[in-house]
Amino acid sequence: RWMRYPEHSVRLKLLQMLQDKQASRSRALLATARFLAPKSYQPGGAVLAFQALGSSARGAVPTLAQMLHEPRNARTAAMALCAIGTDGMDALGQTVPTVGDGNLRANILLEFYFVTSLELQRALSPLLERRLREDSSAGTRLAAAQSLGRFTHAAATAVPALAAAMRDRDGGVRLGAA
């Protein structure tokens, strides 16, 4: 799919930069930042840009990690961090527990409900299992259980965490783990 911005020249510049093997990291970050400014901003388009840039966008990790604390941007920031790779996943694992609002943590984890990439499922499973075991918010634990239950890879690795969640003090979490 192509990004949905009417600013055709910006799209062409990003495409050219991505095709240019000699593109510097700063040019890549600048091009990505331009996608955050237009009035027609579509968050999915920004995530696609981070997917295309991959680990070369690691300079954006601190800003994306901060965005996890913003209700309007948290879900998109989480997916962008996943797209960046190991550095993004590390930041995601460190930052999600520090998000003060349990509902916001739950919304971030629910963003992973439809993840189909086995590689991404493997990378997200430890975070989801940790939130399922340790989070103080029943909503967050429920979101973690639901996302883990949908992962085909996590079916084997998450069984102990899901089994333990069957004894959770919250009925919704128990139901979600089932």
Image (cartoon, rainbow, N blue to C red):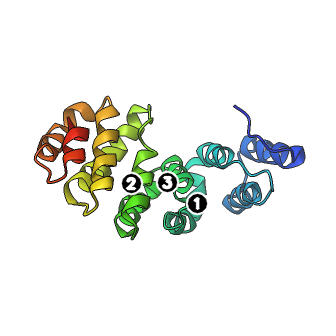
Q: Which residue is mark 1?
A: 72
- The answer to whether 35 appears left or right of 93 in the picture is right
Find disc 3 in the rendering and name its residue.
78
Between marks 1 and 2, how big is the CA–CA gap? 14 Å
Q: Amino acid at mark 3?
A: Ala
> Which numbered disc flags the more N-terminal residue, 3 or 2?
3
Label 3 or label 1, whichever comes before in sequence order? 1
Q: Quadrant of residue 32?
A: bottom right
Q: Residues within 10 Å of mark 1 (few under 14, many from 20)?
A: few
Regarding mark 2 in the picture, which secondary structure is present there?
helix
Residue at 84% x, 49% y is 10
In the image, 78 versus 81, the foreground residue is 78
Disc 3 to disc 2, C-alpha distance: 12 Å
Q: Secondary structure at mark 1?
A: loop
Residue 143 located left or right of residue 111: left
Relative to 111, residue 38 above or below: below
Question: Helix or strand or loop: what does disc 3 sit on?
Answer: helix
In the rendered image, the residue lying farthest to the front is: 171
Q: Mark 2 highlights which residue? A: 106
Q: Report x, y in % for residue 130.
A: 24, 55
Eye-nearest disc, 3 or 1:
1
| Mark 1 residue type | Arg
Question: Residue 174: x and y, percent?
Answer: 18, 43
Task: Please identify the quarter of the rendering in which residue 58 is found.
Answer: bottom right
